[in-house]
Amino acid sequence: MGDLAGSRRVPLLWAALLAALVGQLYALYTPGSPDPPLFDVPGLDKAVHVLLFAIPALLLRLLTPRWWPIAVLALHAPVSELIQWRFVSLRSGDAWDLVADLSGLALGVFAARRVR
């Protein structure tokens, strides 16, 4: 990670992390739609949840050796499902979405170890 820390790519990685986190918040907290989904592919929703947590986890592990940001993401996963269930119209909290979120988190951490 030492070579990455001194790299000129670091600002680009921080920008990618910011974009990933904004995208995550948008995807998780935007109200649902009464219309059927544009792409009705089985499992697509779970794959999206995996990516919503894998990408920020990967970028965070590439940018910092600290584990607390990963812990914050891990806490955000169940909180996001509770918020969707209780407060976001036309959305529902789903235990399998939580499993996908945490799987994505683990995948991102593992991928960062492989990249480094």
Image (cartoon, rainbow, N blue to C red):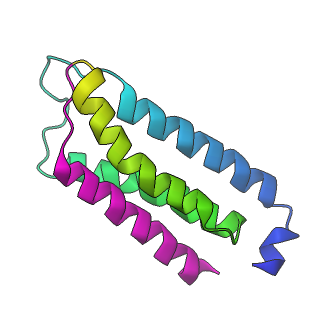
Magenta: predominant secondary structure element? helix
Residue at 55% in and 35% down: 22
User: Quadrant location of the C terminus?
Assistant: bottom right
Towards the viewer: 22 or 70? 70
Report the magenta residues as a range.
90-116
Query: Is 58 displayed left or right of 106 in the figure?
Result: right
Q: Position of residue 30 (x, y in %)?
A: 36, 24
Is residue 112 rendered magenta in the image?
A: yes
User: Quadrant location of the N terminus?
Assistant: bottom right
Q: How many marks?
A: 0
Towards the viewer: 51 or 83? 83
Q: Position of residue 95 (x, y in %)?
A: 18, 50
Q: Position of residue 33 (x, y in %)?
A: 21, 19
Instruction: Identify the image quadrant of residue 107.
Output: bottom left
* Above or below, 53 relative to 25: below
Residue at 37% in and 62% down: 104
Instruction: Identify the image quadrant of residue 7.
Output: bottom right
Instruction: Identify the image quadrant of residue 53.
Output: bottom left
Is residue 53 rendered magenta in the image?
A: no
Residue at 70% in and 45% down: 15
Query: Is 14 displayed left or right of 50 in the figure?
Result: right
Q: Position of residue 31 (x, y in %)?
A: 30, 20
